[in-house]
Amino acid sequence: MIYIHKRIVKIATGTKSQTINICTEDNIHGEYDYILRIMDSKQFTSYDELTVKQFSSIDDLINSIQKDHHGIMEKSSGKTEQVISILDEAKENIHYTEKPSEWEEKAKEIVEKSIDQFILDFIDFPYLHRVEHSIHCELYNILSNGRLLGNQYPLGDHSISQAVHKEWPEYKPRPEKGNRRGNFDLSILSPEQLKRSTIKDFRYGRIKPFIAMELGLDYKLDHLDQDLYKLKNSEIQYGYLIHLIREQYVSDHFNDMERFILEEIHDPVKVAYARISDSMIYYKLVQDKDIKAIPIR
């Protein structure tokens, strides 16, 4: 560790990334005002380099890490208004416009119809898949097999990508994950977003998907609640929760779960739901206002 303007600064270097941890004014181990992460090993810094630069302030140190080393601000005390992280710059450049494009409106319609059909298929064949990852693959195939979402689109000036992505990184880190980012189960990137992005933006998942989906199979209410927070934390424009239950594998207070689905989920997140019991089927399609119940014949 080193001291810069009376603050302890620690560098932690891993195999894929490096963090620069700037302690609070009390200099207590583990208590940091700022944490910056460098994702490219070629951009890693060192104690010697930071010492030689003789920064004029903590702001100057932070700006140098961001500008010279492409550092991403993972934690900020909020005291430094001058700091603009690489992630915030990406937000300005890659963020969807407030009014969706014609392509995005059509993609949203396709996604919702696909999710609805996916729910109805699950009702007909609840044991077509054993585990959740297999269900992810099925919905991915449904989405990517269509002409609009299955097309290839320009990425930046010289590359090609696609609209549907599995395990796309969350846009914002979450405190319960140690201020790291997890991944969305499925995401949609628009051609406009891809065209405005660089390979580095794409590689490090800095593009904010305008659609993200979280799927759950045979989970209790707490998992649904966590998935909701995940989508809302990253402020996804169109978020979808798809919650599937085969009742013989799950013991939960289903009335509470279904009340949560109907009363506590608010825009922009929408829920599709299906629960299969021995004698009844309960389900909700994306735009439904109520949960339907039908007997199994």
Image (cartoon, rainbow, N blue to C red):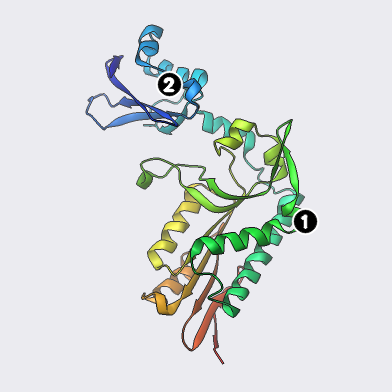
Q: In which quarter of the image is the C terminus?
A: bottom right
Mark 1 vs mark 2, foreground winner is 1
Residue name at image x 50 percent, y 45 percent: 170
* Residue 252, percent from left and from top: 36, 74
Compared to residue 240, the image places residue 205 above or below, namely above
Q: Is residue 241 left or right of 34 when viewed as pictured?
A: right
* Residue 116, percent from left and from top: 63, 70
Compared to residue 288, the image places residue 187 above or below, namely above
Q: How far apart are marks 1 and 2 (CA)?
A: 45 Å
* Snapshot quadrant of residue 6: top left
Provide the secondary structure element on which disc 1 rests.
helix
Is residue 290 at all visible to an observer of this figure?
Answer: no
* Residue 63, percent from left and from top: 46, 19
Q: In which quarter of the image is the N terminus?
A: top left
Identify the residue under disc 1. 147
In this view, the residue farthest toward the bottom is 297
Provide the secondary structure element on which disc 2 rests.
helix
Q: Is residue 250 left or right of 144 when viewed as pictured?
A: left
Amino acid type shown at disc 2: Ile
Amino acid type shown at disc 1: Arg
User: Toward the viewer: 162 or 256?
Assistant: 162
Q: Is residue 40 left or right of 160 when viewed as pictured?
A: left
Residue name at image x 62 percent, y 58 percent: 140
Residue name at image x 46 percent, y 87 percent: 278
Identify the residue under disc 2. 62
User: Toward the viewer: 120 or 27?
Assistant: 120
